[in-house]
């Protein structure tokens, strides 16, 4: 029986690692860069236990694509890059973009502090 997963947010920081991958598309290649990273992320989502969720976005100026991805911990990065199929898919970005990624851990979660307005 397949597992069901639900994405959500906790009120307090949880030990989660985030990958922020900023992809600078070559002129006119934003959609292609998006499709490539989308394929990479779906590959990981289907096969890697350390994957939690991803948010893929295109900038409105047509220049960048951003992948914000939650993983269980930083050791998952090495696991992903040790997968030769993942690596081949990820390297396809080099033909349409330059990119960089960084790993982050949650240190603070800030939520709105506005009081409910009563009329």
Image: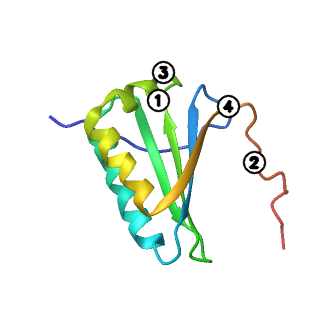
- Report the quarter where the C terminus lies: bottom right
Report which residue position mark 2 lands on. 111
Is 92 drawn above or below residue 82 in the view shown? below
Q: What secondary structure is found at the residue carrying circle 4?
A: loop
First in sequence: mark 2 or mark 4? 4
Indicate which label's residue lies in the foreground, 3 or 4.
3
First in sequence: mark 3 or mark 2? 3
> What distance separates the C-alpha of mark 4 from that of mark 1?
21 Å
Identity of the residue drawn at 76% across and 35% down: 108
Q: Nearer the viewer, residue 35 or 7?
A: 35
- Report the quarter where the N terminus lies: top left
Report which residue position mark 3 lands on. 75
Report which residue position mark 4 lands on. 13
Quadrant of the rendered structure where residue 31 is? bottom left
First in sequence: mark 2 or mark 1? 1
> What distance separates the C-alpha of mark 3 from that of mark 4?
19 Å
Residue 24 falls left or right of residue 75: right
Identity of the residue drawn at 39% across and 32% down: 81
Where residue 56 appears, x then y in whole percent? 48, 58
* Crowd tier of the residue under label 2, counting other residues whose Cα lies within 10 Å: few below 14, some 14–19, many 20 or above: few
> What distance separates the C-alpha of mark 1 from that of mark 3?
5 Å
Residue 80 falls left or right of residue 72: left
Identity of the residue drawn at 83% across and 68% down: 118
């Amino acid at each position: 029986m397949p597992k069901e997963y639900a994405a959500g947010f906790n009120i307090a920081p949880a030990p989660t690692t985030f990958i922020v991958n900023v992809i600078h598309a070559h002129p006119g290649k934003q959609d292609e860069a998006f499709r490539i990273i989308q394929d990479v992320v779906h590959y990981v989502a289907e096969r890697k236990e350390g994957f939690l969720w991803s948010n893929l976005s295109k900038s409105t100026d047509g220049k960048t694509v951003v992948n914000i991805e939650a993983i269980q911990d930083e050791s998952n990065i090495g696991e992903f890059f040790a997968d030769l199929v993942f690596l081949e898919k990820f390297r396809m970005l080099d033909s349409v973009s330059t990119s960089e990624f960084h790993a982050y851990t949650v240190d603070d979660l800030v939520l709105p502090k506005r009081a409910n307005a009563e009329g």
